[in-house]
Image: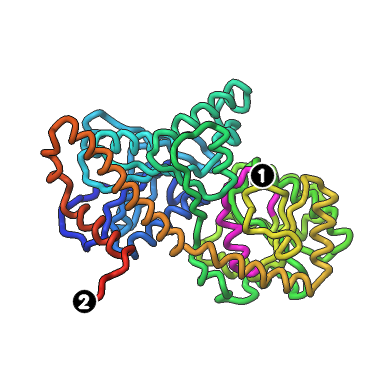
Amino acid sequence: MELQQTDQQLPIGSLRIGLFTDTYAPQVNGVSISLQLVSEGLKNRGHQVTIFAPRFPGYKDSSESNVMRLPSLKYLNNPPIYVAVLGTPRSTWSLTRRHFDVLHAHSPLSVGLLAYLTASTKRLPLIYTYHTSITDYTHYVKFIGGTSVLKYAAGWFSSASTNLGDQIVVPSPKFQRLLLEQKVNRPINVIPNGIDLTSFKAAKNAASLRNRLGIKSDAPILLTVGRMDPEKRLDFIVDAFELLSKRIPNAHLVFAGDGSARAGLEIKVDGTSVKDRIHFLGMVNRAELPDIFHDATVFLSASTTEVHPISVIEAIASGKPLVAVADEAFEGMIENDLNGYTVPLNLQTFADTVADLLADREKLERFGKHSMMLSEKYSIEGQVRLLEKLYLEAILQNWRGNFFQRMISNNMNNMNKIPRRINRIIRTEIGRMMPGKKKK
């Protein structure tokens, strides 16, 4: 939709923020969910947020969502993925004339390029969040996906596109290390993903999942939540479930989500001896997720391509023990023998670890409590405050850099061109950080 940008007076300390993404609602994935939470959190703090995302045919944003949809082309069918087209030079120029204080790109692709062009044209600070390891997803590229040449090119593109940002945000130390290995030379800030913790602390409709699937109250439920795509290794979880079922014959496995691997996985499950105890929920309304998590016994993951998975934060906020294939992405979320286990990519080891945990009721309870304690550091409020601080620092740094450029070319005559509202924001924030003087 076409948004009407105005020059209305905003509260002191309020920022105009542009968020640019190649994936957004109605798509359901970690980036989309994270952006929706961040956007709402920033608006609750008094900021004006505009989201730029590809148009999704048949989907209409609410009038309060402040989403600008860009012309798009369909790239994949299952799940449907649309790639933004930047449009004519005239339409792109009209975008760059809109007023923002800071831009934040969440993708290196077409919409991310638009963020860079806008930032360059208007001399605005550009923040870039590195959500996905591009080299892990080259198999999605048609015809040449997965080749060594493409992987090399993806590594180069990952580094080059990331270096376009003035400040880089990564959700986990795993990606900070990855970017340093790729020779990214911009400042890298680790800001973990956050969620609304309160909504996952308790179930609104206890036993709703068990009642829906006809699972008895004493039967353990193993749960996975998220996109059902090849890199998630959900076939590994099915194979491990077959093994552990020999020890825990009343256990059930539940998949919540959808994706390109679902059809093949359902065919695989139909050929197993445990097909009656494996359930596919499909896409789940986000409001129902807390009830699903609370009915589960243990959360499972076999993916090693995660960054800082929202679903794992939701699991620990719900007080769930976890078993996952070892990956640096779970650093700080899974602590071995305290709230779960990270194990090698080995079927028997994975199956035995889950079975041993299910057999120890005291450990399940103790692990669940520790999970809830660990989740406290992943609130959306904390994430938004850190982003807000980074935005203000980037604005100050940007104006300082531009100021020295203007000093050289204009003998300091352009100092007065710094917008008064930005001055007030910076002065206000500095004032908050400085101890006040008592009046005599």
Residue at the (44%, 64%) spot, across then down: 381
Farthest-out residue, front: 440
Q: Give the range drawn in magenta.
A: 301-319
Q: Residues within 10 Å of mark 2 (few under 14, many from 20)?
A: few
Q: Where is residue 114 in the image (x, y as percent from the top left)?
A: 33, 35
Mark 1 element type: loop
307 magenta-colored: yes
The reply to whether dot 2 and dot 1 touch (C-beta < 8 Å) is no
Q: Mark 2 points at which residue?
A: 439
Q: Using the rendered view, name the quadrant where residue 149 is placed.
A: top right
126 magenta-colored: no
Residue at the (50%, 46%) spot, across then down: 170
98 over 350 or under it: above or below: above
Q: What residue type is labelled 2?
A: Lys
Q: In this view, does 98 lie to the left or right of 40?
A: left
Alpha carbons under labels 2 and 1: distance apart: 58 Å
Pick whichever, 193 or 271, lies toward us. Answer: 193
Q: Position of residue 395 (x, y in %)?
A: 30, 47
Pick whichever, 150 or 177, lies toward us. Answer: 177
Residue at the (36%, 47%) spot, across then down: 19
For residue 212, say whether it is visible.
Answer: no
Q: Which amino acid does label 1 sit on?
A: Thr
Between marks 2 and 1 in the image, the one whose residue lies nearer the viewer: 2
130 over 36 or under it: above or below: above
Q: Mark 1 points at which residue?
A: 304
